[in-house]
Image (cartoon, helix red, strand yellow):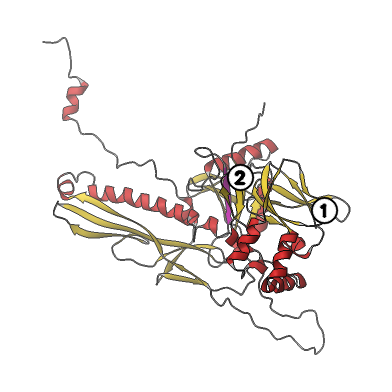
Amino acid sequence: MTDRLALSPDAARQLATATKTVPQMRGITPRYLLRALPWVDLDSGVYRVNRRRTFVLGDDRISTYDDNGSPRVVAGDLREVPYLCEADDALLAELADAFTEVSFEAGQVIVQEGDAADRLWVIVQGRAEKRVTGRYGEDALLEVVGDGQFFDLGAWSRSEPMPYRVQALTRGTALCAERSALAALADRDQALGAELAAFNASDAAMAGCEVPVDCSSGHVGEVDLPGTYVDYEAAPREYHMTLAQTVLRVHTRVADLYNGPIDQTRAQANLTIAALRERQESALLNHPEFGLFHNVSPGQRVQARTGAPTPDDLDELLAKVWKQPGYFLAHPKAIAAFGRECTRRGVPPVIDNRFGSPLLTWRGVPLLPSDKVRFTNGGGLHTGTTEILLMRMGEAEQGVVGLRPAEVADEAEPGLSMRNMGVDNKGITSYLMTAYFNTAVLVEDAIAVLQNVEVANYHDYS
């Protein structure tokens, strides 16, 4: 006998029924990008983007690599220079060897306006700003340049004075090639000499400029009107369906005996589908071929001037995607850093409810958080520099669209199939889970990116 006066809770639990949740998963995120993208249903697996013909001159980046502690230019990437695009590998390797390493400190004037442009500068690491003397003698900022960018190709190629001053914002390293090295190669190689002469004799077309359509306006009387036509790209880009796949396995004994009150197969499928969708969003952002961060054209890249994302930086992005901007997309830490900069300036962002959640906005454009936005050059988790994307959305707006098949067999969700592969000799049922998807940027100015964004800057508000 015990001195207990009533049934204990532990004993009572033997007769009680527990209320159970469906399986939870920490890795599930709101996936705002997938929700914000306008999806185009494809009848076939190919999406061709026809465009007006444009002048394309590369991505304005010359890549570098580390060679036993010393930075070196990737010789093949020198084809970003218009008159080197057809040069042979040996010539490019020789020119790459002519680059020498130069270090600079924050605040240092790297190149003075009006000086002879006897060097081509490639920034390996660091940030600098181009400044010019304005019409009335004022100091004007042209742009901020960062890792991989080079200056000034036109002045260096033509042996002209530098059209602007370059001042370092941070400590960094650059690689420089003397004008004499290019001249020596051009004298020795007739093809290069001819290409260089043609480049120097003409005004180079800006990357992304469309072939003009001749029109007349403001005339009176019976004037001869110009004849014209709109030329198309001869080889338009085609986007093919990519995929994320896995095989889900469920033992028949589990599905037969332990299927209530929660359907085991459905619970397993739901979590697997969530994992596939997470992988899909990551690929749409970061895939080296079709990822949005890798499909920003040269003129649509902005460097964070002070490191931390400021209202001025986001305004620069809005100036790039000024035609119906839809959404910013950034890592939550970058959005938090932007919020701190707004608080410091006394301009707190307006909160707007989108997709059932309160989101920060800037100039009325929501900032969508995504943990799929990567950090680079960091020493640990969520350190280093990141990027902020700005997009215009939709086919009608010539923006960014998501791509998926109109219909797939055994469809569990739009663009995602769950195909029964049968039961093996161990009694395990296998299901092939496949998500088909892609994304397309219809016009270059539909997307812009703020690069080299630092998120570790805090302020004392006391």
Please tell me the numbered disc located at residue 453.
Answer: 2
Residue at position x 58%, y 57% in the image:
74
- Total of numbered circles in the picture? 2
Residue at position x 66%, y 64% in the image:
81
**In front: label 2 or label 1:** 1
What is the chief secondary structure element of the magenta stretch?
strand
Give the spatial CA distance, label 2 vs label 1: 28 Å
Does the rendering let one see residue 100? yes
Amino acid residing under circle 2: Val
The stretch drawn in magenta includes residue 390: yes
| Contact, mark 2 vs mark 1 (Cβ under 8 Å) | no
Q: Please say if 149 is above or below 230.
A: above
Q: Can you identify the residue that label 1 sits on?
A: 113
- Which residue is at the front of the view, 433 or 86? 86
The range drawn in magenta is 385-391
Q: Work out which quarter of the rendered image holds the C terminus and state it.
A: top right
Does the rendering let one see residue 445? no
Q: Work out which quarter of the rendered image holds the N terminus and state it.
A: top left
Question: Which element is circle 1 on?
Answer: loop
